[in-house]
Image (cartoon, rainbow, N blue to C red):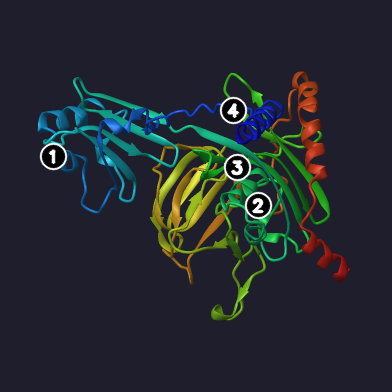
Amino acid sequence: MRKYWGTIIALVLLSACKNNEIKKTTVAVQKPKQEEKVITKQYGFNLDNFKVHKDTVKNGDSFGELMLKNHVEYPKIAKISEDYKDTFDVRKIRVGKPYVILKAKDTTETAQVFIYENDAINYTVVDLRDSIIAYKDKKEVKYIEREASGVIETSLSEAILDQGIDYNVTNNLSEVYAWTIDFFRLQKGDKFKVIYKEKYINDSIYAGAGPIESAFFEHNGKPIYAFAYENDSLKNIVDYFDENANNLRRTFLRAPVKFSRISSRYNLKRRIKYYGYKLRPHKGTDYAAAIGTPIIATADGTVTESTRRGGNGKYVKIRHNGTYSTQYLHMKNQNVKKGEFVRQGDVIGWIGMTGNTGGPHVCYRFWKNGRQVDPLKEKLPQAEPLAESLREDYYNFINPKRQQLDSINFPEKIEEELVTLN
């Protein structure tokens, strides 16, 4: 009987197993892969092949001393100094500039490559292995377009910084409108919009702002557009034009100093208490700024005087053409010599206090047909407008850019404050 029931139970269990088949899943277990070695590549070199030393140029450092400390023989140093002046002038390495030395991975640790960073993007390589090679190169740069806008409350620079914009954009914007807007007389409520590109190295390291591509500035209620356009492809000349293809550039800048203030204007009826209120005409425009501030030529021309004389102190005079000349007084030092040709924007000296002056400034004098006049009241000659043959292409080029500018909103908080004030 026990055998019977045992047989029955066995048959039932066997039947249950068949009706409820257990499906087995085979899981393929892969062996963990060995971690792939990440190759550290910079400046065109595999850094893993070298012992890397990174530093900045210190006071007293010289290229020769840095190389001797890293076991480079003197004949090699002398060859670099003599044969590669055009590519790498060893006398011009500057304190604070970063450099990298790639050394041999052996007991000697001899320098094999020297890399000098000229700026955040450009660098110079001196390859000391085998025959010496020196060349310039640049890091890979990513450009990201940025839009910005602001409303003037106190100054352009403050409005720029309030929007978290690179300060260099202030300088770039002032240069675009240098001939059309008097930045010493900006009004509260003046507005601007700007489109430019920011530069990044390795997608994350900020490397500065690029040139302004298009801009809008409303000054005293007058809107002025500006679009960068290459009007001479052979010479790679880029100028800024307005929506009507008029060149924003003039033959003269409005001032010889950037971001200064006018401390005394051209005034033929000036009377001074110190001299008993006698008539002492002031035939210049004084721009006050800190000692050492660069003074720039307001137009192309030839230096006719660079000397020191009496109350003028150290000064420079430039002849621009048969009609116009300019003079810059009270310099700390001149940066040009008589007979030199200078371009608009070149630094010709620095603000000082030489001669008769009560404070650091440059007295800017302006001659027209041999007579001193007030440059701020002169209608200065304008640069040539865009050629007719380029206008159709220009209008097609700026149309989407103008639409983009028009769609940029001004900061809401400031706009609300202006509405409340009105």
Mark pair 3, 4: CA separation: 94 Å
Which residue was labeled with disc 3?
A: 324
Earlier-in-chain disc, 1 versus 4: 4
**Which image quarter holds the N terminus?**
top right
Q: Nearer the viewer, residue 111 or 95?
A: 111
Crowd tier of the residue under label 4, counting other residues whose Cα lies within 10 Å: few below 14, some 14–19, many 20 or above: few
State whether residue 75 appears in this view.
Answer: yes
Q: Nearer the viewer, mark 3 or mark 4?
A: 4
Mark pair 4, 2: CA separation: 91 Å
Q: Where residue 10 appears, x then y in whole percent?
A: 63, 31
Which residue was labeled with disc 4?
A: 25
Earlier-in-chain disc, 1 versus 2: 1
- Residue sitting at x 39%, y 43%: 337
Kind of residue at disc 4: Thr
Kind of residue at disc 2: Pro
**In this view, 371 is above or below 421:** above
Crowd tier of the residue under label 1, counting other residues whose Cα lies within 10 Å: few below 14, some 14–19, many 20 or above: some
Which residue was labeled with disc 1?
A: 68
Q: Nearer the viewer, mark 1 or mark 3?
A: 1
Q: Where residue 171 appears, x then y in whole percent?
A: 59, 50
Kind of residue at disc 3: Tyr
Q: Which mark is residue 375?
A: 2
Identify the secondary structure beneath mark 1: helix
Q: Nearer the viewer, mark 4 or mark 2?
A: 4
Kind of residue at disc 1: Leu
- Residue sitting at x 20%, y 20%: 131
Earlier-in-chain disc, 2 versus 3: 3
